[in-house]
Amino acid sequence: MFRTWLLALKSLTLHPMRSLLTILGIFIGVASVIWLLAIGEGISIEAQRQIQGLGATNIIVRSVKPPREKQMSSAGGGPVPYGLTREDHRRLIESVPTVVSSLRLREMRATFYHERWSMDGRLVGCSPEYDEMLGLEMDRGRFLTQQDLDETASYCVLADRVAEELFPGQNPIGQLVQVSQGEDFYKVVGVCKHREGTAAIGGSLEAQEFSRDVYIPLTALQARIGDFVMYRTSSSREGEILQLSQITLKVGSVEEVEPTADLVKSILKNHDYMEDVGVTVPLELLRQAETTRLMFMMFMGLIAAISLLVGGIGIMNIMLATVTERTREIGIRRALGAKRFDIVYQFLVETTLLSVVGGVTGILIGIICPWVVWVIRDVIVQNWNEEFYQSLPETFRIVNPVLVPLSIPLAFGIAVAVGVVFGLYPAIRAARMDPIEALRHE
């Protein structure tokens, strides 16, 4: 048996370029299986991480701007109130017994000022639970407290980028920030660490960027700014009346999530006509994400398998040419007593050897996929042009490929199987040659 493998290796080295090109087809197929599945797994993990950040036992109710045809002006020509109200929050707390805690918040666009510096961002009126629910971490100072909420305190907490732009080279703690909405000043009591933004999740949750946020007590926002806000654009002014942007309800267990969500939807049926409220259940999104992940992995694997199929066709093509070239050799071996099985075995060993070498090479290149992506994205592209790097989709910048352990033996097994299957026909064709006719072949 060992001599058969040595003979196969010698036969393949007689035509090194042909053998290398054949190996290349298998190598590309195996590497593409590993790479595509790793990239797909990385995208899936990032999507599930963002959904899990919303909380598996949470139910998110968010105000949605109603369709234009339903945004009718009031008799006075002003804007029509829409979205969640404080009464909605009261009804939900009193009517849903499974809710163990709730979080209200109000968001709005605003411009922030400190001395000669200014920047546009998002003003968020919230309660002390907001940082834990959103996974915010403090860089310095503290987050808002229940006492701040009870006293309607004029305190604020800055996101990292707001602190950098309004207080370059300074310590923001204890200093004042002016907010365009209401022209009020708020004392800085904390600065958050950088938090990655989130992509759009579900039908009612838009993509969010947290680096431009300023957080103040919800009671302070309601008392100093109120529900009516006027936004200035380049060509017009637009008013908005909104009490709450979002209510997040937390239940005691995962089993209570879906029944509670159904109850919440029934309580908020009064918003059905305006279509100004959306209910998002992260648990349902997680299940959908898992199903999508499996489908995506199968699709990516199918695409990569096509590369292996092409490699197998290449093996068959090369082996058919080899059989033709070695017709006289086959005739001599048959004349010396070699059986048909010996001929088939010899050619199958050669195709298997090609597949194994291509498979092993593909695995070695496939394993370094995360490192290659990191070098190309975070070293070459980012250092080459930082502005271009920042303009790329956020998914490209934050997703890291994750190797799927099953993909390595799967790709290698398929590669060897493809080599054997596609090498079988040339081997059988060689074994069925008539020895006398083979010896006459020139």
Image (tube, rainbow, N blue to C red):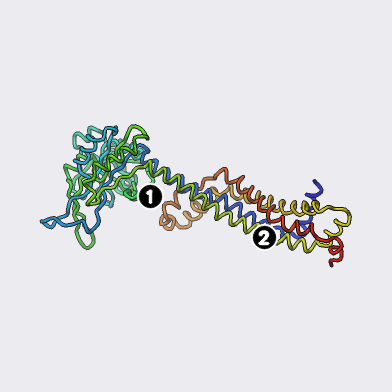
- Name which residue lies at 37% across and 38% down: 56
Residue for point 41% across, 52% down? 394
Quarter of image, res 103: top left
Return the residue found at the far left: 76
Taking the spot 38% from the left edge, 41% from the top edge, the residue there is 283
Amino acid under label 1?
Ala
- Residue on which disc 1 sits: 199
Q: Quadrant of residue 23?
A: bottom right
Residue receiving disc 2: 314
Q: Is 89 located above or below residue 198 in the figure?
A: above
Q: Position of residue 388 (x, y in %)?
A: 43, 58
Q: Mark 2 to mark 1: distance in Å?
A: 43 Å
Q: Residues within 10 Å of mark 1 (few under 14, many from 20)?
A: some
* Disc number lying in front (2 or 1): 2
Type of amino acid under label 2 = Gly
Instruction: Say which element carries label 2.
Output: helix
The numbered mark, 2 or 1, whose residue comes first in the sequence reads 1
Q: Can see residue 65?
A: yes
Q: Nearer the viewer, residue 308 or 335?
A: 335
Give the secondary structure at mark 1. loop
Residue 201: image location, x then y, percent: 36, 48
Q: Residue furthest bottom?
A: 442
Question: How far from the left and from the top, in percent, is residue 305?
Answer: 58, 54
Residue 20 horizontal side relative to residue 399, left or right:
right
